[in-house]
Image (cartoon, grey):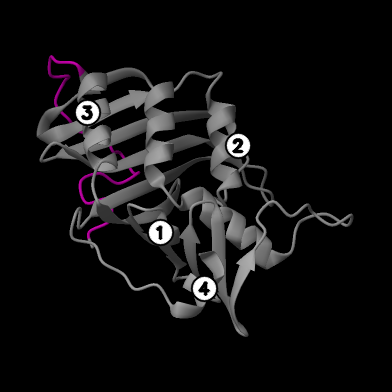
């Protein structure tokens, strides 16, 4: 799958032609509506980090398959210990060494601090279970949306909205640097009338601890949709029994 096939975080707007007349927000709302109405789809969410003077580096990946009826298959394949999960509605079963287990994502943190690691992973995957919710949230907050060529759309977020967006990204498990005066923008792409990808780009200065030097840093959190109406997946019997 060609994740972020049209735009990458680094210089996503560079070289684009000027805005094309039209109702950018209306186009995107309709593209989201059509994708939401699909029977199923596959997606890959990837985080890319770029620090001034260095090549962009993939930070993390989540893969998912969604089907109407509330079933969703999720995995985080590029971590030290691969995380696989099945979601049904608001319940999640995670594959542990001893087998499938229902995780209580509302479990409170122990007095010492953070929740158990497996609980945190389940919480983060639940944030990722239906990326169209995040796309709708970002579209609703975006300002100055414009349509560009080849089905690309772009917008930005106000300074008041940036802290809210950062908080949501961190809750979903994304590692966000301590930016100095962070900025945020959004890119969408429509193909065949459907939303095919979107990317949140957060940038700003970051202080390097050792030298105290401020360098420009950028995080791109992108989601790429595919196999709309053609996605299939099997739900393990053990997980199905726990979730039904």
Q: Which mark is residue 167?
A: 2
Q: Are marks 3 and 4 in contact (CB under 8 Å)?
A: no
Q: Quadrant of residue 176?
A: top right
- Magenta stretch bounds: 2-23
Q: Quadrant of residue 115?
A: bottom right
Instruction: Give the Cα separation between the discs numbered 1 and 3.
Output: 24 Å
Q: Which residue is mark 1?
A: 71
Residue at x-position 47% and y-position 36%: 203
Quadrant location, the N terminus: bottom left
Q: Earlier in the sequence, mark 4 or mark 1?
A: 1
The crowd level at tag 3 (other Cα within 10 Å; few <14, some 14-19, many 20+) is some
Element class at badge 4: helix
| Magenta stretch: dominant secondary structure | loop
Q: Which residue is mark 3?
A: 30
Instruction: Give the Cα separation between the discs numbered 2 and 4.
Output: 35 Å
Residue 234 shows in this picture: yes
Instruction: Give the Cα separation between the discs numbered 4 and 1.
Output: 13 Å
């Amino acid at each position: 799958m060609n994740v972020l096939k049209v735009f990458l975080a680094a210089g996503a707007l560079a070289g684009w032609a000027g805005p094309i007349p039209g109702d950018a927000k209306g186009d995107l709302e309709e593209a989201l509506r059509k994708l939401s109405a699909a029977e199923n789809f596959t997606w890959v969410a990837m985080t890319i980090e770029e620090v001034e003077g260095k090549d962009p580096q993939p930070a993390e990946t989540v893969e998912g398959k969604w089907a109407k009826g509330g079933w969703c298959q999720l995995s985080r394949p590029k971590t030290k210990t691969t995380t696989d999960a099945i979601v049904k509605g608001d319940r999640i079963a995670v594959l542990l060494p001893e087998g499938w287990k229902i995780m209580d994502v509302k479990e409170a943190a122990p007095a010492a601090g953070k929740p158990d690691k497996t609980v945190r992973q389940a919480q983060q995957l639940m944030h990722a279970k239906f990326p169209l919710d995040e796309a709708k949230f970002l579209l609703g907050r975006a300002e100055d949306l414009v349509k560009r060529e080849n089905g690309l759309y772009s917008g930005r977020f106000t300074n008041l909205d940036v802290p809210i967006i950062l908080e949501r990204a961190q809750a979903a498990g994304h590692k966000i640097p301590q930016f100095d005066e962070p900025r945020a923008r959004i890119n969408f792409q429509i193909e065949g009338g459907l939303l095919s990808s979107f990317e949140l780009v957060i940038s700003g200065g970051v202080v390097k601890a050792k030298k105290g030097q401020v360098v420009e840093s950028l995080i791109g959190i992108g989601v790429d949709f595919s196999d709309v109406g053609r996605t299939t997946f099997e739900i393990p019997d053990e997980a199905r029994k726990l979730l039904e």
